[in-house]
Amino acid sequence: MYGIIATWRMALEGISEAADMLKKSADAGDSIETAIRAVEDFEFYKSVGYGGLPNEEMEVELDAAFMDGDTLDVGCVGAIKDFANPVSIARMLSKEPVNNFLVGAGAEKYAHRHGFERKNMLTERAKTHYHNRVKETTENTELKPYSGHDTVGMVCLDDKGHMTAATSTSGLFMKHAGRVGDSPVSGSGFYVDSEVGGASATGLGEDVMKGCVSYEIIRLMKEGKTPQEACDIAVNTFDKELKKRRGKAGDMSLIAMNNKGEWGVTTNIEGFSFAVATENEEPTVYLVK
Ligand code: ASP
C-alpha cells in the first residue's frame, strides 16, 4: 500500500506528482520532497515558498521540516530567507549527525555552502498584499498577524512501508522578524514513525505548540486508535483544554495517515481543505465543513 495526505487544496498538484512516483515504487522521502517543492515553487500560493507573504518588515522568512519515519531523523529550518526550496534544505539537515535544526543566517550559510538555489522569494503580488495591509492599519493599531495563514504539511507512505513527514510555510503574515511557528518543530507541526503512522498540522503555531498535537496523534495511533479517532481525540481534547485554560483556542487542523494507508483529519475551523492519494484513491481534494 502507498499513500500521501496533505493539508490544503494547494497540495493537489504536488501530491498528484508524488502519487505517480509512488505508483512506480519510488521512496517516500523522494516523493514527499517532490510534492512539497511543487507547492513551494508555485508563485500564487501565498503562504508557502515563492510568493509567500512577508513578515512585518516585508521580508519573506520561511520555516520547513523533513522527518524520516524509519530512522526518526529530523531536519528543520526556521526563518530562512532567499532560498527556493526550504524543504530540501531540511531534508539534507536531517541526515547530519548533529546541527539538525538551523535558523536564520546559520541556515542560509548552510544552504549556500551546499549549493541550494538562491531566490528572492518576495513577489510583486506579495508586496501588494503587504502594502494594502499596512494601509489598512491606522497609526494607533498594531499590525496583527493575518488569520488566513496556511502551511503545507504532508505524510507519505511508500510500498515498502517507509513513511515520511514534511512541512513548508511562510508562517503568519506580518509576523515579527525571527518568529518561528510550529511547522518546523518536531511533535508539533509534524511527526512520523513508520511503525505507526504520521501527522501534520496547520493553524496557529503558537497554540499547536502548546499541545504537541502531531505527536499526540501518533501516540494515540500507537495505542490502537485509527487515524480518524486519533485526530478527533487529540484535536478536540486540546481545543477544549485551551478554551478552558485560556478562554480561546487558535485555528488547528490536523491530518494523519497510518502505516496501512488509512487516514484521518480533524479541524476546529470552517472550510479546511486537504488532499489525499492512495493506491486505492486517485488524488482527491476534500473540504471539511
Ligand atoms: N502553523 C503555521 C505557523 O504558525 C501557519 C499555518 O499553518 O497556517 O507558522
Image (cartoon, helix red, strand yellow):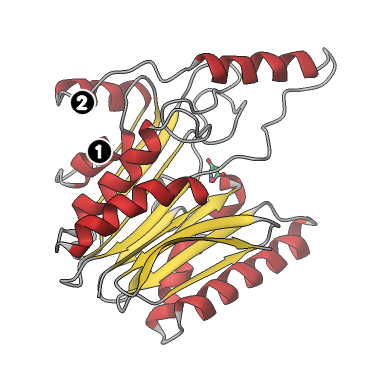
> In the image, is the residue at mark 1 within 8 Å of ligand 1 by its beta carbon?
no
SS of the residue at dot 1?
helix
Q: Whole-percent x and y of residue 203?
A: 59, 49
Give whichever of 101, 113 is nearer the camera: 113
Q: Which residue is mark 2?
A: 116
Query: In this view of the protein, can residue 45 be seen by the observer?
Result: yes
Q: Amino acid at mark 2?
A: Phe
Q: Dot 1: few (<14), some (14–19), or many (≥20) neighbours within 10 Å? A: many
- For marks 2 and 1, give the CA distance: 8 Å
Q: Residue at x 82, y 21 (%)?
A: 141
Give whichever of 56, 116 is nearer the camera: 116
Circles 2 and 1: CB atoms closer than 8 Å:
yes
Q: Quadrant of residue 20?
A: bottom left
Q: Whole-percent x and y of residue 75?
A: 27, 45
Q: Residue at x 21, y 61 (%)?
A: 22
Farthest residue toward the front?
282
- Assign the C terminus to one quadrant of the image: bottom right
Q: Whole-percent x and y of residue 114?
A: 14, 26
Q: Is residue 19 shown above or below 13?
A: below
Q: Residue at x 72, y 29 (%)?
A: 144
SS of the residue at dot 2?
loop
Q: Residue at x 51, y 41 (%)?
A: 181
Label annotation for residue 88 = 1
Label annotation for residue 120 = none
Q: Is residue 126 shown above or below 148?
A: above
Q: Whole-percent x and y of residue 7?
A: 49, 54
Q: Amino acid at mark 1?
A: Ser
Which badge, 2 or 1, is on the more N-terminal residue? Answer: 1
Farthest residue toward the bottom?
224
> In the image, is the residue at mark 2 within 8 Å of ligand 1 by its beta carbon?
no
